[in-house]
Image: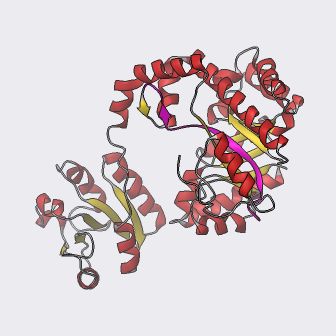
Amino acid sequence: MTAGPSFFVLDDDVEFREALMEALAASGCVVEGAGNPMAVPLAAFARADVLVLDLALPSIDGFGILAPLAGLPQPPRVIFISGNGEELLRAAGDLGRLTGLTVLGALEKPIEVEELLSLARRPTTLPAGDSALMAQNAEQIREAVAAALARQALPVMFQPLVRASDLGFVGAEALLGNQLDGFGSVRPPQIIAALEEAPQMLIDLSYQVLDAAAALCARWTAAGHNGLVSVNMPLQVLLTPDAVVRIGAIVARHGVPPQRVVLELPEDAVYDSSASALTTLARLRLAGFGLALDDVGQRQSGLMQLAKLPVTAIKIDLELLRQARDWAKPRRIIASLSALGHQLGLKVVAEGVETREDLERVRKVGVDYLQGFLVSHKLPADGIMALLNRADDGCLSVNGGMTAA
């Protein structure tokens, strides 16, 4: 019985390949290897759980065998290795995923065996079938959302927002839950994608989420807690002529001042330079609402538009933080975004803080606030109130004992 996954090492450096194979075998793994991909039948790769693939190979480089690998009935998962720099490894990872392979990661030579084994043992979530599922179930999702809207029973959850310095509570972001009555388990992006064909329904959904968010903000304020509540506000809402009035009325109905509400703008709001969208944003800001630019760093050109928008905060995209665990360039980008935000007088929020290393990284670059699984998964409103009641002097703990919703 082996202690780990089986490997195929494809590298033309004989000394390196044999040393790596010996180290993996000593760890209890079944290992095969070769130096020339043209001399190995594709079926041999399929016998392994993980293919360790060097990019610089004779006859055909590592990029050239990705498509044949993806064509196998059960292709191995792939870890890229190279001594030619981070840029090529990142490109290989992106290309491998686009080809349809499961890419576990990439390592620069020389590599540590324990690092390789750690990547090989990473759990993988396969996205295969998501598009087909969306196409098949979009109508059912819309029907379930319509029923939930009619009953005012949307599954609204909340994820705490805390100060990076001491994890002090500063608010929460309203998010859709993962269970939809009449449909079952569903990811929030699937709901939003299904509603692209029903823009009015997306508008109604956004207002119900805002209503739930304002209600929770009023609850924690009455209980003696200070905090902002943030709500995603799609471009479809911002383009409606009565957006400012309706948003203001919902918040006022719960007795919450606009200064306690942050509206998170998606990237399409950044690229929409219409007078209507910009006027709405300016009027919301004038009314006292905070405006946060979401997913900053996801599309680099969006930074060029920052000067146009009256935003009060930027949120660093969670995918950028995940990439920073393995790569130097994303770490430098995060530091630059934090510095840029502060130079512009904005608050900087890091999303997706899931490990203590993530926490130390964002603290080091001086972000103001953070949210992520390290502090809490998203919770129902009652869960947020329970979390606050247990908080010590308003500060939450790392892995506060809350379970995923």
Along the line of sight, the residue nearer the viewer: 219 or 13: 219
Q: Nearer the viewer, residue 240 or 92?
A: 240
| Left or right: where 275 falls relative to 144 | right
Question: Does residue 109 appear anywhere in the picture?
Answer: no
Percent position (x, y) of residue 198? 53, 17
Task: Say if residue 367 shows up in the picture.
Answer: yes
Q: Position of residue 156 (x, y in %)?
A: 61, 34
- Quadrant position of residue 134: top left
Q: Quadrant of the N terminus?
A: bottom left
Q: Is residue 345 above or below residue 39?
A: above
The image quadrant that residue 155 belongs to is top right
Q: Is residue 314 left or right of residue 113?
A: right
Q: How many marks on residues?
A: 0
Asked if residue 179 is positioned above or below residue 239 in the image, the reply reads below
The residue under the point 71% across, 66% down is 363
- Residue 315 vertical position relative to residue 33 in the rendered view, above or below: above
> What's the magenta region?
166-182
Residue 402 left/right relative to 14: right
Residue at horizontal 32 percent and vertical 54 percent from the top: 102
Residue 92, how many percent across, how many down?
A: 38, 57
Front one among 237 and 216: 216
Residue 109 occupies which quadrant of the picture?
bottom left
Q: Nearer the viewer, residue 130 or 327?
A: 130
- 25 falls in the magenta region: no
Question: Residue 204: horizontal and vertical position, in percent?
Answer: 63, 19
Q: Residue at x 38, y 68 (%)?
A: 119
